[in-house]
Amino acid sequence: MPSHKAVVETYFEGFRRRDHAQILACLTDDVAWDIHGHTHLVGKEAFDREIERPNATEGPALVIDRLVEEADTVAALGIGEGSQPSGERFRFAFCTVCTFVGDKIGRVESYVVPLKSDE
């Protein structure tokens, strides 16, 4: 059984590579995802639709500053940079809280804060 932190690292690497299969393999079938201030999703199919970015040519640059684990939960804190469908670049700070059911992520809570380009 992989460590919870290793699963979270694999999950984030899937986003960097735009590898849906890698991301979805980390999740339970009934995963719940709350992107606070944006949406609430349930299930792998809804998750897959949300991460689809047909106009994106690359995955986001995601730098995890630290992973904090407590019981069945891992929090990942970091900085990211990506592009909007318009091509405009954006930077953000994030905290993603992953709660596990066994060795897969059953709940994801995402907090995303836009940053100015000089932050």
Image (cartoon, helix red, strand yellow):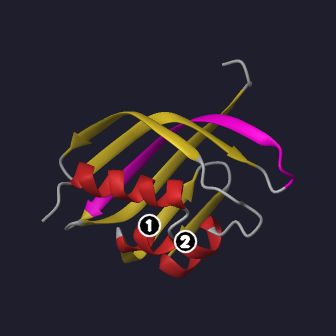
Residue marked by disc 2: 47
Amino acid type shown at disc 2: Phe
Answer above or below: position of 118 versus 12: above
Residue marked by disc 1: 23
Q: Quadrant of the C terminus?
A: top right
State the mark number for residue 2: none
Residue 87 belongs to the span the image colors magenta = yes
Q: What residue lies at 74% left-to-right and 24% top-to-bottom?
A: 116
Region of the chain picked out in magenta, as a range: 86-100
Amino acid type shown at disc 1: Ile
Q: Name the spot of residue 15 as percent of width and height, x first.
A: 51, 57
**Magenta segment, principal secondary structure?**
strand
Of the numbered discs 1 and 2, the one sitting upstream in the chain is 1
Nearer to us in this view, 79 or 110: 79
Asked if marks 1 and 2 touch (Cβ < 8 Å), the reply is: yes
Nearer to us in this view, 34 or 95: 95
Nearer to us in this view, 3 or 73: 3
Q: What residue lies at 83% left-to-right and 50% top-to-bottom?
A: 87
Secondary structure of residue under mark 2: helix
Label 1 – label 2 distance at C-alpha: 10 Å
Q: Name the spot of residue 101 as percent of width and height, x first.
A: 25, 67
Given the current orientation, which residue lies at the most extreme right position? 86
Q: Residues within 10 Å of mark 2 (few under 14, many from 20)?
A: many
From the viewer's perspective, tell me whether residue 72 is left or right of residue 15. Answer: left
Q: Residues within 10 Å of mark 1 (few under 14, many from 20)?
A: many
Q: Quadrant of the N terminus?
A: bottom left
